[in-house]
Amino acid sequence: MTKFEAKNIVKNFRHEDYTLRALDGINLKVEAGDFVCLVGPSGCGKSTFLRIAAGLDTPDEGEIKFDGKTITGTGPERILVFQEGALFPWLKVSDNVEFGLKMAGVPKDDRSQISKRFLDMMQLTKFANAYTHQLSTGMKQRVAIARALVMDPDVLLMDEPFAALDALTRDLLLVEMQLIWEKTKKTIIFVTHNVSEAVVLGNKIAIFSNRPSRIKKELIIDYRRPRLVEDENLMKYQKQILAELRPEVKKLDGNKK
């Protein structure tokens, strides 16, 4: 069943004396329960596309459909997790996780019960009463993911959530993210610059071309889970993605000259 579909998404950015086309007809189908990773050269428009999918920006042409209906703005069925967790530093971890539920009018006792489940899932129970400034960057990202999951979205949109993490923390979270996906059955669209990260997480990889971007190729990865970064059997998938990306990166370097 198709959960999310992008049809001919075009996005331009207008400056005083010129127009920059970022997206040049993005077409993508995401089935219910898919984990789709978007990879491409830096600045090619992956995050712009994700913002359009979230309803935070609008395309100049084309449409995004969710369960067959065209989206016209944000909605609780689509939640975006940013690279920076965007947490409230004056709130405790539990209050940050419960914030969306509170805004939705969920009673306090119900909020507490729901948040406890996801605090436990993200190994945050011991930190429920801590403030975010007391947490590491990795722990903050766990809080941001838990805050998104408590809202029970149909689609979780993730914009390079592990980019700022050290390698060890990232590798641990890559395993946990797979386990969470398998437990919750969420549909996930995940932007990353890291090819090995994409291969570990995604069951489908959408490879973006250089700007103005289109989806150059889609790669299906049918491999057992949980996957580990050090698994040499995943190298063949990484090589396929890199073979598609290298000429696009060269185009980007050429544009800078």
Image: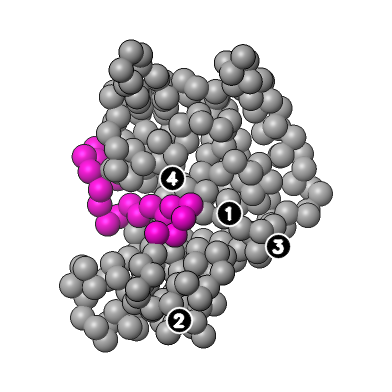
Residue beneath label 2, please? 130
Residue beneath label 3, please? 168
Q: Which of marks 1 and 2 is nearer the N terminus?
A: 2
Residue beneath label 4, please? 31
Query: Does dot 4 land on a helix, a strand or a loop?
Result: strand
Q: Earlier in the sequence, mark 3 or mark 4?
A: 4
Q: Nearer the viewer, mark 4 or mark 2?
A: 2
Q: Which amino acid type is shown beneath numbered disc 3?
A: Leu
Residue beneath label 1, please? 164
In this rendering, is residue 92 above or below 240?
below
Asked if the stretch drawn in magenta spans residue 240, the answer is no
Question: CA gap, disc 4 to disc 1?
Answer: 29 Å
Residue 88, image x, y percentages = 36, 67
187 vs 253, nearest the viewer = 253
**Mark 1 surroundings: few (<14), some (14-19) or many (≥20) residues within 10 A:** some
Query: Does dot 2 land on a helix, a strand or a loop?
Result: loop
Question: CA gap, disc 4 to disc 2?
Answer: 38 Å
Q: Quadrant of residue 37?
A: top right
Residue at 74% across / 35% down in the picture?
A: 239
> Is any part of residue 190 visible from this angle?
no
In this rendering, is residue 16 above or below 228?
above
Residue 77, image x, y percentages = 30, 55
Q: Earlier in the sequence, mark 4 or mark 1?
A: 4
Q: Which amino acid type is shown beneath numbered disc 4?
A: Glu
Report the label total: 4
